Image: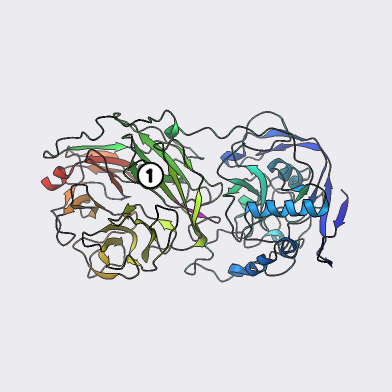
């Protein structure tokens, strides 16, 4: 392959040369040909690249990018990364990268663009069929902090996370291209979506989607994700220290994109109208209970995009049409890049939850901690933490909305775009009597610490973090009648009791005291909610398992806790990750993350990590 140097002239000065490599037309097998692969790398299929093109020998550097956008120099060294002229540029969105190629095209009078995903894998492999262009393994000199990283979480920083991103310091592949394995991820042109079988010519991805493809892996990433076939993706507005780009000089392929990804089961045949009897529930004066009903339905031995191994951290809400919608994360390991969010629907008038389908899955990003909220009118809100890479140590916070009972969703918007702490949603979203939406979020990544809140005073358009901390993680929050906020959290007990936090200034400061409840620990999360009837509802875990209680006097005193059981003779019930427990009149579920909502008909819907319980206020107050 021939290498050419293109000199960029700006304001009369000579910039760093942009080295281009000529890549000839040809064909290759795209996707997984090795034994171990991700679900989105199959089916392997032959792709023909019909026209020769030129591609940057390296990723675009700081000096090259800043000829287009001098203001980017202010981002050099952010979080310690990419300070020098010849390091790969980072903290650039997909849109930034596209604007650079448009500027370059205008400057040079030739078409520049991002590579398609197929072009990227073609030139990265450079004729190889092995996991890396170096063979079955990636030599040590290519590895830059090649491990699962929690950076920049200060509590887990190992002190050696900052690595240079200097381009062309390792040997190129056979076609003269540098750093295709693990310097920085590289934006591609395509919308992300599943592969289709059969031979293809010049594929260009999907017609639309949530995520733009990134390829190549980055520093601070496990070796598995640096393979030639590995696929990643990110929101096109996202900027982080792990994503950069390289350019292609060629016209766009004339190929038509594939259709958008088919909707999930929970999105199909969704009722648009509201049933006339949706507010008609059981007699509010008589105790009502139904359950447990399993809502996590994933095929055994499923390894992506849904995972049978670990399903946890749910959210539930009722839709305007009376359906219940539940979401939760599904994964092999909680720290892993594969962690995604699944969904299931219980349609109005039906008794069984549907099988799970994909709700949200940023490819190879840890999608940690979902939350749902229905505004009581027609809008559903979805909140989600989205990691820069693996772990929940560096989450940005996104929001989507649905106006059609969850059948379709708005494009995701980064409401807290900086990847960091205080962005891990907790499932107790609500609106205050003043109209402020309150979204709790864990403030730290460990098992002992605090919970932050995020506030929106304009219906979700803008958000702010008042800065104070609830005592304990996974905080459940509600508003008292006098306007103060009250919260309970996990960990950090006071006098051997669960901590209670109260704020009179909308979360800027909090005062702490011991509650009447026992503290909870690993694998457990409480819930707190104001009921439509007026009392405050609370559910947590005690000596005999999951219980519910209500307060009629704004959290000063609480009713006798009632175990959440069906009161049947002892029988096994599936708990978190399929580990069964014995339910009886004296024993309830012992572990799980709770989420709760109240239906338009007054029924309280409480879910654990696997089971759904439905009851009314009269049942809780009746006690046992």
Q: Residue at x 57, y 54 (%)?
A: 238
Say which quarter of the image contains residue 508: bottom left
Which x, y percent locates residue 100? 71, 55
Q: Is residue 192 visible?
A: yes
Judging by the rendered image, the residue that carries numbered circle 1 is 577
Instruction: Name above or below for residue 121 compared with residue 510.
Output: above
Q: Residue at x 16, y 49 (%)?
A: 562
Which x, y percent locates residue 88? 70, 61
Say left or right for 192 vs 366: right
Instruction: Name above or below for residue 236 compared with residue 152.
Output: above
Say left or right for 446 vs 6: left
Depth check, front residue: 532 or 386? 532
Q: Is residue 132 magenta?
A: no
Say left or right for 400 vs 531: right
Q: Main secondary structure of the magenta part?
A: loop
Identify the element where label 1 is drawn: helix
Q: Is residue 388 magenta?
A: yes
Total number of numbered labels? 1
Q: Is residue 173 visible?
A: no
| Magenta stretch bounds | 384-394
Which x, y percent locates residue 169? 76, 63
Say which quarter of the image contains residue 450: bottom left
Task: Tell me the crowding category of disc 1: few under 14, some 14 to 19, or many 20 or more residues within 10 angstroms, Cα based.
Answer: some
Which x, y percent locates residue 58? 76, 56
């Amino acid at each position: 392959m021939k290498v050419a140097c293109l000199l960029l002239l700006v304001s009369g000065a000579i910039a760093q040369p942009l080295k281009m490599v000529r890549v000839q037309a040809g064909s290759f097998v795209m996707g997984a040909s090795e034994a171990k692969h991700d679900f989105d790398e199959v089916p392997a299929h032959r792709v023909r690249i019909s026209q020769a093109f030129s591609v940057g020998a390296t990723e675009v550097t700081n000096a090259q990018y800043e000829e287009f956008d001098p203001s980017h120099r202010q981002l050099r060294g952010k979080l310690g990364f990419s300070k020098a002229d010849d390091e790969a540029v980072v903290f650039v969105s997909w849109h930034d990268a596209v604007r650079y190629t448009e500027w370059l095209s205008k400057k040079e009078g030739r078409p520049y663009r991002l590579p398609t995903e197929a072009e990227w894998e073609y030139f990265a492999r450079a004729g190889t069929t092995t996991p890396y262009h170096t063979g079955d393994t990636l030599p040590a000199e290519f590895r830059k902090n090649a491990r699962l990283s929690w950076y920049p979480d200060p509590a887990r920083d190992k002190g050696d996370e900052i690595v240079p991103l200097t381009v062309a310091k390792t040997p190129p592949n056979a076609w003269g291209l540098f750093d295709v394995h693990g310097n920085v991820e590289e934006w591609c042109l395509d919308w992300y979506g599943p592969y289709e079988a059969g031979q293809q010519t010049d594929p260009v991805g999907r017609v639309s989607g949530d995520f733009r493809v990134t390829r190549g892996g980055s520093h601070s990433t496990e070796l598995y994700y640096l393979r030639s076939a590995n696929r990643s993706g990110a929101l096109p507005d996202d900027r982080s220290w792990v994503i950069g780009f390289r350019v292609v000089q060629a016209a766009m392929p004339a190929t038509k994109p594939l259709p958008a990804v088919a909707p999930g089961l929970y999105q199909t045949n969704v009722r648009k109208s509201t049933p006339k009897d949706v507010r008609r529930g059981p007699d509010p004066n008589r105790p009502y209970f139904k359950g447990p009903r399993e809502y996590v339905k994933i095929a055994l031995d499923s390894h992506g995009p849904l995972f049978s191994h670990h399903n946890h951290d749910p959210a539930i809400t009722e839709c305007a049409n009376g359906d219940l919608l539940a979401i939760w994360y599904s994964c092999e390991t909680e720290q892993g890049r594969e962690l995604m969010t699944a969904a299931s629907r219980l349609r109005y008038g039906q008794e069984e939850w549907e099988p799970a389908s994909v709700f949200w899955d940023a490819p190879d990003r840890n999608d940690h901690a979902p939350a749902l909220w229905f505004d009581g009118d027609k809008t559903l809100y979805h909140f989600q933490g989205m990691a820069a890479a693996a772990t929940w140590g560096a989450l940005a916070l996104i929001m989507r909305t649905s106006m059609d009972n969850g059948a379709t969703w708005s494009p995701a918007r980064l409401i807290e775009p900086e990847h960091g702490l205080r962005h891990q949603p907790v499932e107790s979203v609500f609106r205050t009597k003043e109209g402020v939406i309150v979204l709790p979020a864990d403030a730290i990544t460990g098992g002992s610490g605090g919970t932050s809140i995020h506030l929106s005073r304009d219906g979700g358009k803008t958000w702010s973090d008042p800065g104070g901390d609830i005592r304990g993680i996974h905080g459940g929050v509600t508003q008292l009648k006098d306007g103060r906020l009250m919260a309970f959290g996990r960990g950090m007990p006071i006098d051997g009791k669960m901590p209670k936090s109260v704020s009179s200034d909308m979360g800027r400061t909090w005062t702490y005291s011991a509650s009447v409840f026992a503290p909870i620990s690993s694998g457990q999360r409480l819930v707190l909610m104001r009921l439509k009837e007026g009392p405050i509802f609370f559910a947590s875990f005690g000596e005999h398992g999951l219980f519910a209680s209500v307060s009629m006097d704004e959290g000063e005193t609480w009713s006798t806790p009632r175990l959440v059981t069906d009161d049947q003779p002892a029988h096994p019930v599936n708990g978190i990750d399929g580990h069964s427990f014995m339910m009886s009149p004296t024993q309830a579920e012992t572990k799980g993350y709770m989420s709760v909502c109240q239906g338009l008909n007054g029924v309280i819907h409480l879910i654990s990590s696997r089971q759904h319980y439905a009851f009314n206020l009269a049942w809780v107050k009746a006690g046992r």
